[in-house]
Image (cartoon, coloured by chain):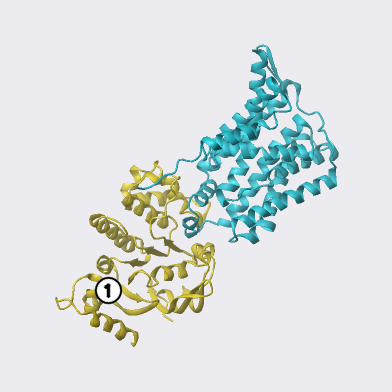
Chain colours: A yellow, B cyan
Amino acid sequence: MENNIRLLINNISVVYSDVIQVLKGVSLTIKKGQIVSLLGSNGAGKTTTLKAISGLLKSENGKVTEGSIEYDGEPVQNSSPEEITRKGIIQVLEGRQEFKYLTVEENLRVGTATRWGKPFKKDLEMVYHYFPALLARKKNLAGYCSGGELQMLVMGRGLMAQPRLLLLDEPSLGLAPLLVKEIFQIIRRVNQELGTTLMLVEQNANMALQIAHYGYVMENGKIVMESDAEDLRENPDVKEFYLGTAASGALKSYKDVKSYKRRKRWL
Amino acid sequence: MEFFLQLLVNGISLGFLYALSALGFVMIFKSSSVLNFAHGELLAIGAFLFLVLSAWAKLPIVLAFALTLVGSFALGFIVERLFLRPLIGEALIEVIMLTVGLAAMFKGLLLFVFGGDIHDYPEFLPEGLSLQLGTIQVPSVYVAALIIGIVFLILFGFFFKYSSQGIYMRSVADNQPAALSLGVHVRRVFALSWAIAALVCAMSGIVLGIINGVNVHNLSGIGLKVFPVVILGGLDSIGGAILGGIIIGLLETFTGGYISTSLREIIPYIVLVFILMVRPYGLFGLVEIERV
């Protein structure tokens, strides 16, 4: 096996409450130092994939029933989130799950939970360096921060853990376009300057594919397409369904829409 | 006037004790949403542990006090490990019923070992601790209650505000999934909150034991008083627990002093009913931050 692979997901199935199967044989690879983006519509299983990696499935009564997840060559499927976070995988949850009644700086300090007792001053400076907007708000309760500030806060909080693999779930959700641009620039800088490997789940395929090295497209609990980010950007199907620009310029009929799925399923 | 001031001082120091024990109750509720019905029994266990160490084993008082604190801290830890941890993920009502069962079990054990009589601690508070404020005399035990209450409430205040572990505990209370995603050891936080709860219970149990004598029924009954205190102060705020404690303490001593001593035990509950009618979330409940 090549040793530049950070995470290898091999044909996993995820079942909630022993009956609801959400992932049906998902495989994907994340190389060290890359940004990998996972695209797909609502309910495709993107968040479930992230939670399978981070171990958060457990608290939702979900389980990886088949396949394996290897992190730096070590199997981690169905481990507890406490163990997985301590190995260096941090998931930034969807929808900005801040601690409302903690100040911004206290929120960031919770990010050091995986390495309790170690100094964190340097990391605070690093987070304020990437997110200067947080510095001005550090004594404020997080509950009173704006949506953009909160997104920066939860990403900074994840970085405080010094992750080796950071899983970002929809960082652009509900943010103004300019802010989305800023957030994605920061993600790219974090990747380039800190060397953090990132997995990015996004609805905003356009932005995600601009900064990602590699991309996967998910549908109905399966990976239907994977390729280098540039190729995906040029792919007519992706263009039509996720980038909002029809390949031929004209609207396609519903039949063709279905043909896309059919074709991919038989791949 | 003198009588009034005397009652005022007694009430406030009693209030700090209630606040201290309420702090333990609030902590468990904040971190795991569990209402701990075994609160009074934790109080009684602490008081009896101190009785065993000080009066029976005749250890030096300071050592006995320290050992009681360590012992009850460990007890809280063990209780969480043995009884509560297997129920994580089960419905809340089951966990709450478990604490009712724990209360019965602890009370039975204490009655079995110590009987229903009133025991007394050896005299150990120095006379010099009593205060002469103008014309009123504050007995040393009330001064001790005031000191212990204030010192430990400040200590816990700092713990929650500045220490990493305190911040992790608050994060779990605030948003458990997010805390989990950052690797906060949620089960450890639950265990710690039980341990701290047992510890503060033991402290207030000891001082209440000095005031009223050590008796299983008395102490577990006082533990029940945590309900009016925390509901008055709001179930989730520590500052509210302090205010609630002082209000209940004052109500009790004034009722006992001016109206009748037999009424003093029930007046907190009467007030509780009226407050809940007017302000169902308590007087000082957390102001909900909502995004609109």
* Camera-side residue of B61 and B238: B238
Q: Is residue A189 above or below residue B16?
A: below
Question: Which residue is pictured at 67% across the width and 54% down the height?
Answer: B97
* Camera-side residue of A44 and B177: A44
Residue occupying the far left of the picture: A249
Q: Secondary structure at mark 1?
A: helix
The disc labelled 1 sits on which kind of residue?
Answer: Ala
Q: How many marks?
A: 1
Question: Which residue is pictured at 37% across the width and 44% down the height?
Answer: A144
Residue occupying the far bottom of the picture: A266
Which quadrant would the N terminus of chain B be assigned to in this image? top right
Q: Is residue B67 visible?
A: no
Question: Which residue is pictured at 55% across the width and 34% down the height?
Answer: B275
Q: B198 left or right of A153?
A: right
* Camera-side residue of B258 and A76: B258
Rendered location of residue A54, percent (x, y): 47, 66
Q: Is residue A93 above or below residue B218?
A: below
Q: Quadrant of residue A4?
A: bottom left
Question: Which residue is pictured at 74% across the width and 41% down the height?
Answer: B44
Q: Quadrant of residue B17?
A: top right
Q: Is residue A132 visible?
A: yes
Rendered location of residue B93, percent (x, y): 62, 55
Determine crowd level at label 1: few under 14, some 14-19, many 20+ residues with C-alpha closer than 10 A.
many
Q: A266 left or right of A78?
A: left
Residue corresponding to mark 1: A229
Callout 1: residue from which chain? A
Rendered location of residue B31, percent (x, y): 56, 50
Rendered location of residue B225, percent (x, y): 66, 37
